[in-house]
Image: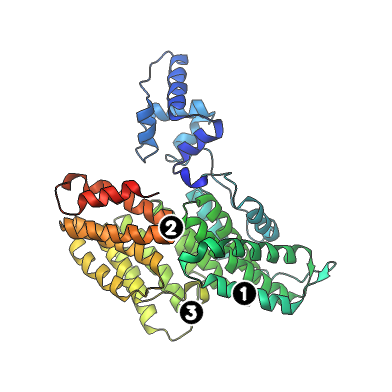
Amino acid sequence: MEELIRHPLAYARWQRGWSQSDLAQQMRDAARRRGLRAGTSRQRVSLWEKRVIPDEFSQTLLSDVFGIPLARTTALDWPLWLPGYETPAPLGAGLTLTVLRKAVLMGVDRRTFLAFAPAALGSLALQWATIDPALAAGATGGRPVDPAFVDWLEKSASGLTSMPTVSRQHTGPLLDGHFETVVNLLESGSYHRALGKRLHTLASALAQTIAWHRFDHERHASANLYWHAAVHSAHAAGDTDMGAGALSDIAYQSIWLGRPRAAVECLGHALSRTTNPTARSLLFLRKARAHAMLGEARDCYRALARAETLLSSTIEEAPGWCAWMSPADLSVDTGRCLIDLGLPGRAHDEIAQGVSLLPSTRNKTKAVFLAYEAESLLAHGEIQQAAEMARRSLTLAKQIGASRCVQQIRDLSSRFSAYGSEDGVELLRHNVAMAN
């Protein structure tokens, strides 16, 4: 399963059918061919797949083993030179239907580790910011598309996308089916320009929702395929706010995976064509988080201020893809930024306030927010309370089946290792060990 591959080095091994021990042996053999010795072990490979960076000599051996030019390893940071990254199709090149069909065909296939490298994401975002949308022309030659059927698809899809996260085991296959149906109509149906615009808008909305399903289950390559499709289809429909939303979701994924610089660049381009105030508020909030991760406090505070002003001053209705954006999100993400900037005391107050405002219908978001609260409490030395918040987050994550939220707590639980005697810590570690 794709979600078991958490690092591009593991993906590169998978491509060749190698275990960690196999790769270590390959590296030792590569060193011997150079008249040198390498002490690479399975344990060291395991550390590299947990975000420890190999030294220069080890990266040289890895490039030899995987047949990658050494110049590529020096031109790109680790692990971006490893195989497995997708190249996005250019906007405005008439490839929208190809991208949509690829999502249908490859959405469950593990062809890549993590679809876009930072440079590729930046290129796609720049294209989106500079290439004017070309509204999709009508299509002729196929069976006429019934507008009443499109009405039903739109209404049905709206109901499915608004279902609570816990229902995804049932709604996921239905959304996949709706998306494929829309792609089939776009490819082989006969329709006028206005109806084509509706179909592309629906395809973009469905792709964006499906991408979140994949992302929540850590199927990052599949998620990128669908977000990529959402960007293209929104571009074809001329919906710049929806396109910005899909780009900002890819940026959020980059933040989640520890690549804030790529997110800053992407969100900067996305904001250049975003007009709805709520949408802009969300994008500024995500940009603030990326700046905080980079330690760029001034830029972070500026982005937070813009997000707050936009959210508090607008009376314009928000697009469906960001209609959930609320003061709760602003408070919690402000707190998350403060944690990254080394201010856990202030962070806890913001996060606690945001969690209290969050409606019960948003349990997935609450699971993430509780994990943030646990982290802020831990950083502030409140060990027992931190363990309790982490357990609550884990319980919610398991209930809704969001493996990325479970993994978030699993990663956090390792930081409790020095506090094993504190109340609640042993229970937390036991619950994490028992989580699937």
Q: Are marks 3 and 2 in contact (CB under 8 Å)?
A: no
Q: Residues within 10 Å of mark 2 (few under 14, many from 20)?
A: many
Quarter residue 342 falls in: bottom left
The furthest residue to the top: 35
Q: Residues within 10 Å of mark 1 (few under 14, many from 20)?
A: some
Q: Nearer the viewer, residue 215 or 90?
A: 215
One can see residue 336 in this view: yes
Q: Residues within 10 Å of mark 3 (few under 14, many from 20)?
A: some
Q: Are marks 1 and 2 in contact (CB under 8 Å)?
A: no
Residue annotated with mark 2? 402
Left or right of 311? Residue 99 is right
Rounded to the nearest angstrom, the CA distance separating label 1 from label 2 is 24 Å
Helix, strand or loop at label 1? It is: helix
Q: Is residue 199 above or below residue 23?
A: below
Residue annotated with mark 3? 318
Helix, strand or loop at label 2? It is: loop
Q: Residue 306 location, x and y as percent? A: 36, 74
Quarter residue 133 falls in: bottom right
